[in-house]
Amino acid sequence: MSGGGSARRWEAGRLALRLALFLSMTGIALLVLMVVAFALPVFSAGESGGPFSWVWAPAQGKFGILPMIAGSLILGTSALALGWPLAAALCCWLIAPPPSGRFSRLSRALVGELVRLMTAVPTVVYGFTAVFLLSPFIRSWLGGTGMSGLTAAVMLGVLILPTVVLVLQAGLGARLESVALSGAALGMDRMEVLWHVVLPRARDTLLASAILGFGRAVGDTMLPLMLAGNAPQLPASPLAALRTLTAHMALVTSNEAGSAAYDSLFMAGLILLTVNAVVSLCLRRLGGRS
Amino acid sequence: MKRILSALALILLSASLAAAAPLDSFNGQKGTLDIAGGTAHIPVMKKAAQAIMTANHDIRITVAGGGSGVGVQKVGEGLVQIGNTGRALKQGEIDRYGLVSFPFAIDGVAIVVNPANGVQAMSKAQLKDVFAGKVKNWKELGGKDAPISLYVREDGSGTRETFEERALDKGTSAGGANVVNSNGAMKTAVAQDENAIGYVGIGHLDNSICGVTVDGMVPSQENAANGSYTITRLLYMNTKGEPSGLTRLFVDYIYSPDGKEFISSSGYIPVDKK
């Protein structure tokens, strides 16, 4: 009797699972299909003012989004260059030394919690804070208008910090624990084990954390929109304004509906989707190997 | 008992009075209304459409952009019932399509700088040079020796359209200017940056920023309304022939107190129906 009930429940559960799988897969497939379908006509238009040119001037019929693609890549890379080393060092400090001394243990626990808390801070809060604190600072000390690639990159570096720290902590921490005792038997302290044994074998984890951080930096909209200045140009210096694909989409959708400028956004969307798909595929590959 | 009853009656009466809002004219109406054209109109149209559709679920209103040209073309060819333009119709357009115009709001744009900036008046020619990127330092305008930070609105913004059309005489802004995406963001940017110059819808002027006098014209709501400040334009709704049915009701609703509220909250100055 109860066996029959549990079998029925099992059947129902399997059905629900399949339905959920089917729904989410269809949703994703539809999304990709729609974006591609809308982007294709723009792609095949192929005029001089098409999406793959350097000038964005909708009034003159020029819809080039190359400056925005460059902006996204530049900003993603520089955010990673600023945020990743910091995150890696922070992670090593969090996991490496033996948990000795009340003060050091306390401060470690505190920083660990803080990093976890940082994942929950909405990006608009970072953006707003930076508008009032960071950009005046950059304006008065380094020059420019304070709304620049540098400003956005610094804040994006802060944004990806917790992501990178948590990924590294999960990957490196476990490995360190598994060899720490053997290392201690050889007379190495935890930092030495981490440096000489764990890190050289942890290329995949390091790479995965970098890729994830890059994906997060490229995908963020609010920070570049609020801080990067949004001029559709190839930035001449870190203090010049630049526009990312995400900020570009946010800017254009606020006014346009059903025009050529609007259509070119689907191209931007397709490129963003492709970047994120590549990121996630890379992660999948790395995950499979380790 | 009697007192309670009369109080009840009073409450009912006041409730029914409150409900006798402009939206009542849509009672019992159904159908669809399509609106397209000028982008500056979109916030007003959307707020009105939302209010109407919330009150009456049988009415569907779509609001699209496209620009003034698209507005004229679509309403003229009968693809939409209301085509919005940020300019008066040309005689050719009126003749060809038989369009009727309804100006409903004044869109004024004030050029703004940081209150700490010494330069609070300039000529139109200077303004053009500044936004073209030819004049790069406040010194050249009689201010202190500091680089000018240019702030502009995004493409397609109605505020930007009015500014470029009326203040720059259809010129465009320098490519390297910082772009912000709302009047609020513009205010924050200019209030934060001592060397900034930008522009906002005239309804958004306040103490955090300083309106610039251009060619002797002082930006203010009153001056925009009485015509002594000319960096303004009228926003029009256009219909093919005299509007009827739902279209008529919608046009009237825009002129109602509710509509005026939407116009003011979008940063424009309401205009009475002639």
Image: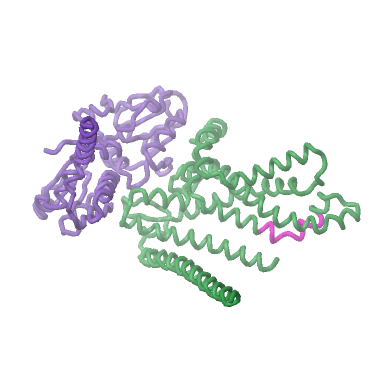
Chain colours: A green, B purple
Q: Is residue A247 left or right of residue B212?
A: right
Residue B177's spot in the image, x, y percent? 42, 40
Residue B172's spot in the image, x, y percent? 33, 43
Quadrant of the snapshot with the N terminus of chain B: top left
Residue A139 position (above or below residue A119): above
Q: Is residue A226 left or right of residue B101?
A: right
Closest to the observer, B196 or B78: B78
Please tell me whether the stretch drawn in magenta is mainly helix, strand or loop.
Answer: helix
Closest to the observer, A81 or A194: A194
Closest to the observer, A162 or B75: A162
Quadrant of the snapshot with the C terminus of chain B: top left
Residue B18 position (above or below residue B65): above
- In the picture, residue A30 is in which quadrant? bottom left
Q: Is residue A205 magenta?
A: yes
The residue lying at 44 percent from left, 58 percent from top is A268
Q: Is residue B95 magenta?
A: no
Residue B225 position (above or below residue A80): above
Residue B74 appears in the picture as rendered: no
Kindly give the residue lying farthest to the front in the view shown.
Answer: B1
Q: How many marks?
A: 0
Residue B20 appears in the picture as rendered: yes
- In the picture, residue B262 is in which quadrant? top left
Q: Is residue A72 left or right of residue B179?
A: right
Residue B148's spot in the image, x, y percent? 43, 32
The residue lying at 70 percent from left, 49 percent from top is A88
Residue A7's spot in the image, x, y percent? 57, 76
The residue lying at 60 percent from left, 64 percent from top is A282
Residue segment shown in magenta: A196-207
